[in-house]
Image (tube, rainbow, N blue to C red):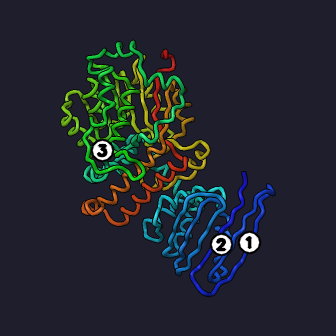
Amino acid sequence: MHHDSSSTLTAPSSTTTTSTTTTTSATATATATTTLTGDRLSPWHAPLRRLLARVRHGQLSLTLPDGRRIEVVGAAPGPRAELRLHRWRPAWRLLLQGDLGLALSYRDGDWSSADLTELLRFGLANEAALGVIESRGPARWLARWRHRANANTRRGSRHNIAAHYDLGNEFYARWLDESMLYSSAMYEAEEPRPTAGAEYEAHLAPSPAKRERAGGEGSPNGTVCVERALTPTSLPLRGRGADAASPQTLESAQAQRLDRIVELLDPRAGERVLEIGCGWGTLAATLARRCGVEVVGVTLSTEQLAFARERAAQYGVAPEVDLRLQDYRDISGQFDRIVSIEMIEAVGEAYWPTYFATLKDRLKPGGVAVLQAITIDESQFERYRDSPDFIQHCIFPGGMLPTPERMAAEARRAGLRLTTESRFGRGYALTLREWRRRFLAEWPAIQALGFDEAFRRLWTYYLCYCEAGFLAGRVDVGLYRLTHADAEG
């Protein structure tokens, strides 16, 4: 559907001029009219004026380096954004480096916004009308070369993981909640969106026979394991308050997500569980303590490993939790259950077949694997693959988001079957918003650890950038349950 688009541009001055531009689309149904009121803009502002005239959704208040202010109002509803240009350099960096140039110019203080997430949402809402600005020339080839240089070989993976996760446990502890879970929480306001229909609902309500197979009423797994998992207070809480957009705390939302993972895994006492990418150890320790299982967890972060071992000891399950500094490709043996939370994003497209083959080879017949994965919309994938973005350049070197469709295809090729898929992207937006709130509130203490102002701005941009992507539906997060392709049920 085509929409008329009206934009009003104003500048603070008693001397005013007015001009009107009308454009008609090739489909002959849409017109766009732009009205400019205020100081006369110089001729070299003409490209900017033409660009803003194409806005369709929402509103933008733009302040130029010389103090002139431009108000743009699109015909369709959308985000209400504000942008202050402190110098013109961001325009050139955007043209040369695409979204990476925009991010780096924010890091360097070239521009600011009262609500960065809303501004990024505004850009996404108007991307089709404004056009996609990608890096070009030498900058484009350099970005591709750098991304390929971060390939996730065994050595490359150690380097890539250390670059992000070895910033220090004290750094992450300042703004994550007590669980130290650095992956999306699950808020009550958004229950997961199941895509496996009745099978998903049936799995969430195990039959009496299934409970009996799991060990019965008094076992450390089965019914008791699930009931304990469904108690949010089973995690220690810092009690730092709920997100402004949700009455639920981050702590209880993370506990609720752990509950769902336990349900999907359905572990039984005495079984062996493999966690690929064990992070700071909370899930491994929780599974051992709640369900009476033995857990092998692997990570490539020395910082995470040290913390995770301490957490297992705090939970009283150190003998049952074997945590290793090990590449997932070097694991041997088979396991009754495998869990991997937001790990596939760090694998790299070239190694997706290896990752899923590892799941297949390490999973016992009749076993269950549960993945939590951040995915990108299929319609965006080719461009995303072709032009490494800000996240891959500055935050997660070597990272690559799959699409749900490509994950399912890789699983099939490996001999696995996807039985459950449920997504909760809005929950990640809420999680990111709360992380950002805590990060900024704790900034004086974080700065004292040796991080500078450029780091603060870069990470603020990172958290807002991701939040905007989840709110716009460009990226999503979901839980995926896999079994062997020849398994029953």
Between marks 3 and 1, how big is the CA–CA gap?
A: 54 Å
The residue lying at 32 percent from left, 43 percent from top is 251
The amino acid type, in three-letter code, at marker 2 is Arg
Q: Quadrant of residue 230?
A: top left
> Which of the two discs, 3 and 1, sits closer to the camera?
1
Rendered location of residue 281, percent (x, y): 28, 38
Asked if labels 2 and 1 touch by Cβ distance under 8 angstroms, the answer is: yes
> Which of the two discs, 1 and 2, sits closer to the camera?
1
Secondary structure, mark 3, is loop
Q: Which of the two discs, 3 and 1, labels the residue nearer the N terminus?
A: 1
Q: Is residue 263 above or below residue 56?
A: above
Reading the image, the residue beneath label 1 is 21
Q: Is residue 415 above or below residue 302?
A: above
Residue furthest to the right:
28
Between marks 1 and 2, how big is the CA–CA gap?
A: 10 Å
Can the viewer see residue 302? no
The residue lying at 48 percent from left, 58 percent from top is 117
Q: Nearer the viewer, residue 115 or 338?
A: 115
The amino acid type, in three-letter code, at marker 1 is Thr
Reading the image, the residue beneath label 3 is 180
- Residue 9, numbered circle: none
Secondary structure, mark 2, is helix
Q: Nearer the viewer, residue 303 or 339?
A: 339
The residue lying at 25 percent from left, 47 percent from top is 238
Rendered location of residue 232, percent (x, y): 31, 36
- Residue 49, numbered circle: 2
Left of 262 or right of it: where is 470?
Answer: right
Q: Quadrant of residue 226?
A: top left
